[in-house]
Image (cartoon, helix red, strand yellow):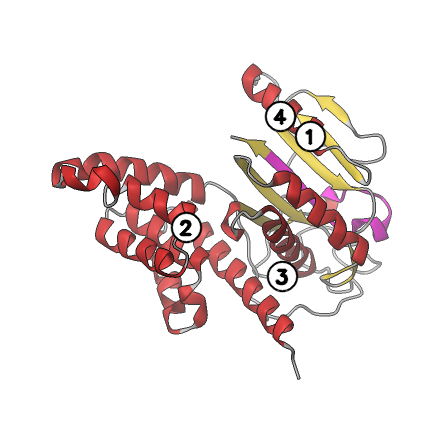
Amino acid sequence: MRDQAGAESDTALDVVLLVSRARGLARAGELGGALRLLREAETTELGAHRDVLDLRARVHAQRGETAEAAQCWQRVLARHPEDPAARAGLARLGRTGPLAALGRHRTRTALVAAACVVTAVVAGVVTTPDGPRTARADTDRAAGQSPGASATAGSGRPNPGDGATGASGTEGAGQQEDPAAARRAAALAHDLRAPGLRVTVHGDTVEVAFAEGLFSEGAQLTPAGARQLALLGERLGGRHLAVTVHGHAATVPGAPHSGGSVVALWRALVAARELSAASGEPLTAYTTDSADQRDAPYPDPARNRTVTLVISPE
């Protein structure tokens, strides 16, 4: 018999999967498809989750459906009166505070602001599995490619192996580095460096890898892995950051050596949940995907039962 904690864990992961799929559709310009996916959850408990309603509001706003967007954010506030994202969204729509008195002629301006919010939400790359909702207890034999799990192959980032702390230039010849963005990244890297973490600056982004594997098998965090994620999450809280969590899996003989895996994706989702809980930021603040096996951070399979983060200060 499943306990309450297990049920809550499944619900949290279901929310991440739903939001990730909808964000992927929205990013691809398929706003109608994203909205249909979110609406389908209305008959379940997922439909009332703040992250689902928040994304649904943003998609409505980008489609120009301000009344529907406002309704979704108002539903969030009904259960979470101090929710900052819902309050900010309503303010941008001109439906709360002093903007409410300005009337319809301000709608166009409010829509532009709301669309900017949506752009920030759907800009990340998100991949999700179409397979079972529960993780397989793998020994990393499940590291084969899944139809629904794509990867970040060809990212061009150097692997954060031993001694990989420090700074390097931005990738790509001819790219001009933004000095202010580079300074923000360097400052963030300084704040994040801690025992057990390998922090590398790549121009205006910061890559974080963990010195040891975070997972024992499947998506089961080790006690040390859970502590590492909690400590990192605390450092990420209260900052304006774009965070992508790349899941990794150990490659075993006979398994595919590229294409990503469900196991890796599931690890990214679990890590995002832990970072969200520790940082106080919503799950929608984290983009998740399965990294390609060729982008594994270490040659040691055990250490590749992990995730890496790419963080951009905003």
175 falls in the magenta region? no
Amino acid type of the residue tagged 1 in the rendering: Asp
Q: Nearer the viewer, mark 1 or mark 3?
A: 1
Between 1 and 290, the one lying in front of the other is: 1
Query: What secondary structure is found at the residue carrying circle 4?
Result: helix
Please state if 198 lies on the left or on the right of 247 as rendered: right
Amino acid type of the residue tagged 2 in the rendering = Glu
Q: Residue at x 72, y 51 (%)?
A: 248
* Mark sitting earlier along the chain (2/1): 2
Which numbered disc, 3 or 4, marks the residue closer to the eye? 4
Please give left or right for residue 197 compared with residue 37 in the image: right
**Mark nearer the viewer, 2 or 4:** 2
Q: Which residues are magenta?
A: 295-311
Q: Which residue is mark 4?
A: 185
Quadrant of the image occupied by residue 47: bottom left
Task: Specify the farthest residue to the bottom.
Answer: 1
The tag earlier along the polypeptide, 1 or 3, is 3
- State the mark number for residue 82: 2
The residue located at (73%, 60%) in the rendering is 143
| Whole-percent x, y for residue 105 in the image | 12, 36
Residue at 45% x, 56% y is 51
**Foreground label between 4 and 1:** 1
Q: Position of residue 167 (x, y in %)?
A: 72, 22
How much space separates mark 2 and mark 1, taking CA atoms?
28 Å
| Res 191 label | 1
Q: Position of residue 142 (x, y in %)?
A: 73, 64
From the image, tell me which residue sits under label 3. Answer: 146
